[in-house]
Image (cartoon, rainbow, N blue to C red):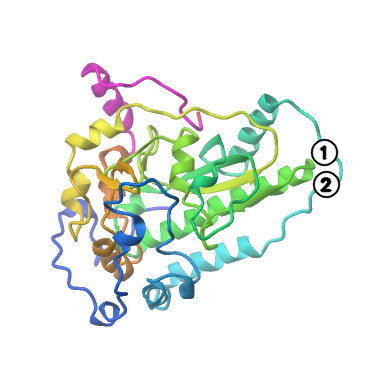
Amino acid sequence: MRPSTDRSLKPIADGRRWNFVPDPGQMALRPQVSGNTISGLGERAVRRPTPVYWQKPASIAHGRMQEWFEQRPIGESVRAALARRQAVMDTPMPERAETRQRKSPREWSAGVRERALAFDADLVGVTAFRADWVYADRAAPQYPWCIVLGVGQDYAQMRYAPQEPAGTEVLVQYGRILSAARRLSGWIRTQGWDAEPFGSPTPATFPLIPAAIAAGFGELGKHGSIINRIWGANFRLAAVLTDLPLQADRADVFGADEFCRNCRVCEKACPVDAIAPLPQLVRGVERWYVDFDRCQFFFNEHLGCSICTTVCPWSRPGIAPGLLAKMARRSLPVERAGAAGQ
């Protein structure tokens, strides 16, 4: 894609200042319970997550807000991207072959990586699937392995966040990563093993970020998304659960967490001050956290926002290698524990 030629659109870099007042119609749909309470902000005990959004609306407290978002008027480019994504969902996948092909976990893992990249994924990682990732109101899928896939976004389009070019690009890449996950699942089934794809737009069974971190995609950033050593936070996720015998990748810890403690770029850019300056206690774990209630009003009215992940220094093309080198000179941890997708 190329940068938009619409002169009414301005990139984030132009320094826009937001004086955001939520739409009264949306405000009227707020549930009495805070999304932060549902997420477990401030809780000391470890527990499984509770879904807040992207579910069947009747099943969640914020369901009417989700419906409000889904029913808003959209532009033609967004409509076209949604149609292409739906076409991916409607494409049938093959049934599992009766005879299972036999290879070692190492050989299968290499084959999965090769196929995933051929199916247009940019990042691939494998981790053992954990039942404690699954939302508390769901039965855990009975698969031992999770293959995580990622696709990068066109930064030239994302610079227009939270305007339509960026929202369209997000949907385009969700369609691309969903296609990769479904094609990979289909290939595994033709080998005689079970596989099931997980990704937008189906109601989430488990959050993908913990699995992606375990699979070597990077570290959680202050903006609540993963920072990858190649793509920064400028990518989207999907997953495939399978019983195919695989070999796990290792987490990739390269110093992004420490970098975020000293960087305030996303924090300052957030139009609604939703990004906490320090890690917060969430369900018994201290980690970076974005205030759901503040974020969601702006998110709903701006086609998904994406400001914080786009302004992240790691997301700018060509910047990550320099940041890694700079961190190495400062003696921050930069050991390569398993960079996914390389």
Residue positioned most to the right: 99
Which residue is disc 2 drawn over? 97
What amino acid type should be assigned to the residue bearing mark 1? Arg
Q: Is mark 1 on a helix, strand or loop?
A: loop
Q: Where is residue 123 in the image (x, y as percent from the top left)?
A: 50, 38
Distance from label 1 to label 2 (Cα)? 7 Å
Q: Which of 234 and 297 is in front in this view?
A: 297
Q: Is residue 240 above or below residue 107?
A: below
Q: Quadrant of residue 23?
A: bottom left
Instruction: Give residue 182's position: percent from left, percent from top.
Output: 64, 52
**Residue 170 vertical position relative to residue 64 in the rendered view, above or below:** above
Image x and y of residue 147, in percent: 58, 40
**Extreme residue toward the front, this view:** 45
Can residue 246 be seen from the camera position used here? yes
Q: Between residues 9 and 272, which one lies in front from this camera angle?
A: 272
The answer to whether marks 1 and 2 mark residues whose Cβ atoms lie closer than 8 Å is yes
Q: Are there few (<14), some (14-19), or many (20+) residues within 10 Å of tag 2?
A: some
Residue at image coords 30%, 63%: 163
Q: Quadrant of residue 19?
A: bottom left
Instruction: Return the residue at label 1.
Output: 100
The main secondary structure of the magenta stretch is loop
Does residue 6 appear in the picture of this structure?
no
- Residue at the spot 49% in from the left edge and 43% down from the top edge: 150
Is residue 326 found inside the magenta-colored segment of the image?
yes
The stretch drawn in magenta includes residue 53: no
Left/right of residue 58 with respect to residue 315 in the rendered view: right
Tally the marks.
Answer: 2
Highlighted range, magenta: 316-341
What amino acid type should be assigned to the residue bearing mark 2?
A: Ala
Q: Left of 148 or right of it: where is 93?
A: right
